[in-house]
């Protein structure tokens, strides 16, 4: 096995696009319950599992190839904040704007959010769940877990990449049982088995873990994942790893979706599901019409995500790249 190459990075980008699309499709088809279409989105939530696997792989991969050291920890966190927070905060602002517009409609029945509130402060620090707040967007809880992973991996990375193979195995052995010992769903430990497949793949593909130990440790992680996320989660993790390993040919539509995946993930609920589908459903009574509405909403939302990416996310990407270790 050769070290990770641009081929793997292409596969990660495409996989990210598929995962974001799956989550989007789940929420869109959820607007027409008890239909065949709703069944097609039933397993879209496992896209979150795929995102965690991707982060488990790509974050340490990036640290490895940027010669990251522990003294770069706060630079690393700043880099992630500059990369992810501007779009995240912009999506929160979008939620308030759309809610204000929606209140003008006679059909509006949603709950109002107070912009200047302690709950907004919780959002700024990704701690709404921890302090019993309420996420303005239900997918935000996954961003909180991701941010905790950044806090964790920045500290843990120098240990997991230690040249001593025995130390690596001990570290992995310590991480594996954490979901069963620390079960609070508000913290990363509960989801460690979803990040580990990606982390193990990173170690293997950078030749820091030999094939024998990789197969053994991966088998254990996949097996134990069943008790955390059932077979659906296990299959999602296995497919994610296989996709990164074996998919080599770039597919342009998937590369496009991968590029805008974060923007799509952020806005598909407030813009696509709430502002577009749920609002227009007030004027459509038939099931067939509502199903057609979903197929219209998808390209509209993807276009909106592209605009969001171009004008909000891309500048934050450029800004984060100015931070070097």
Image (cartoon, rainbow, N blue to C red):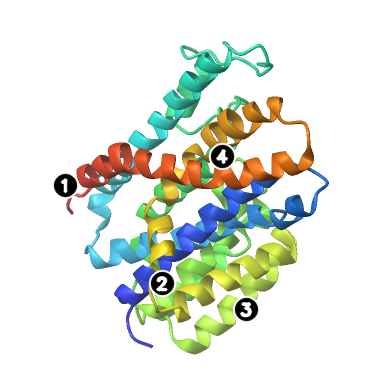
Compute the Cα span from label 3 to label 2: 16 Å
Residue designated by label 2: 202
Q: Residues within 10 Å of mark 1 (few under 14, many from 20)?
A: few
Q: Nearer the viewer, mark 1 or mark 2?
A: 1
Compute the Cα span from label 2 to label 4: 25 Å
Residue designated by label 4: 141
Quadrant containing the N terminus in the rendered view: bottom left
Q: Are marks 3 and 4 in contact (CB under 8 Å)?
A: no
Direction from residue 34 to residue 101 in the image, left or right: left
The correct choice, above or below, for 271 with respect to 209 in the image is above
Location of residue 248 in the rendering, given as x and y in whole percent from the top left corner = 40, 79
Q: Quadrant of residue 276?
A: top right
Direction from residue 26 to residue 165 in the image, left or right: left
| Disc 3 element | helix
Q: Are marks 1 and 4 in contact (CB under 8 Å)?
A: no
Residue designated by label 1: 322
Q: Which mark is residue 219?
A: 3
The correct choice, above or below, for 154 with respect to 270 in the image is below
| Disc 2 element | helix
Q: Residues within 10 Å of mark 4 (few under 14, many from 20)?
A: many
Compute the Cα span from label 3 to label 1: 39 Å
User: Which circle's residue, 3 or 4, is located before the other in the chain?
Assistant: 4
Q: Residues within 10 Å of mark 2 (few under 14, many from 20)?
A: many
Compute the Cα span from label 3 to label 4: 28 Å
The correct choice, above or below, for 283 with respect to 307 in the image is above
User: Which circle's residue, 3 or 2, is located before the other in the chain?
Assistant: 2
Look at 66% across and 68% down and name the residue there. 234
Quadrant containing the C terminus in the rendered view: bottom left
């Amino acid at each position: 096995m050769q070290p990770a190459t641009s081929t793997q990075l292409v596969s990660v980008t495409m996989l990210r696009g598929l995962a974001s699309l799956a989550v989007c499709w789940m929420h869109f088809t959820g607007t027409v319950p008890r239909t065949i279409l709703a069944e097609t989105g039933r397993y879209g939530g496992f896209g979150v599992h795929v995102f965690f696997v991707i982060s488990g792989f790509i974050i340490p991969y990036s640290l490895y190839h940027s010669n990251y050291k522990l003294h770069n920890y706060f630079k690393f966190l700043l880099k992630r904040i500059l990369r992810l927070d501007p779009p995240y905060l912009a999506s929160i602002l979008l939620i308030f704007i759309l809610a204000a517009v929606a209140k003008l409609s006679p059909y509006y029945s949603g709950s109002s959010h107070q912009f200047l509130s302690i709950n907004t402060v919780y959002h700024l620090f990704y701690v709404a769940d921890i302090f019993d707040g309420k996420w303005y967007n239900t997918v935000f809880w996954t961003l909180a877990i991701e941010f905790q992973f950044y806090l964790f991996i920045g500290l843990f990375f120098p240990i997991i990449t230690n040249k001593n193979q025995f130390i690596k195995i001990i570290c992995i052995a310590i991480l594996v049982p954490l979901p069963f010992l620390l079960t609070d769903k508000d913290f990363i430990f509960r989801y460690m088995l979803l990040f580990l497949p990606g982390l193990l793949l990173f170690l293997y593909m950078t030749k820091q873990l030999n094939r024998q130990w990789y197969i053994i440790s991966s088998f254990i992680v996949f097996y134990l994942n069943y008790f955390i996320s059932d077979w659906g989660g296990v299959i999602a993790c296995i497919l994610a790893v296989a996709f990164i390993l074996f998919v080599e040919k770039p597919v342009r539509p998937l590369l496009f979706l991968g590029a805008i995946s974060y923007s799509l993930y952020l806005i598909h609920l407030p813009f696509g599901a709430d502002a577009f589908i749920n609002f227009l459903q007030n004027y459509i009574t038939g099931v067939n019409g509502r199903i057609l509405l979903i197929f219209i909403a998808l390209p509209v939302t993807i276009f909106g995500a592209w605009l969001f990416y171009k004008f909000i996310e891309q500048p934050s990407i450029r800004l984060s790249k100015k931070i070097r270790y």
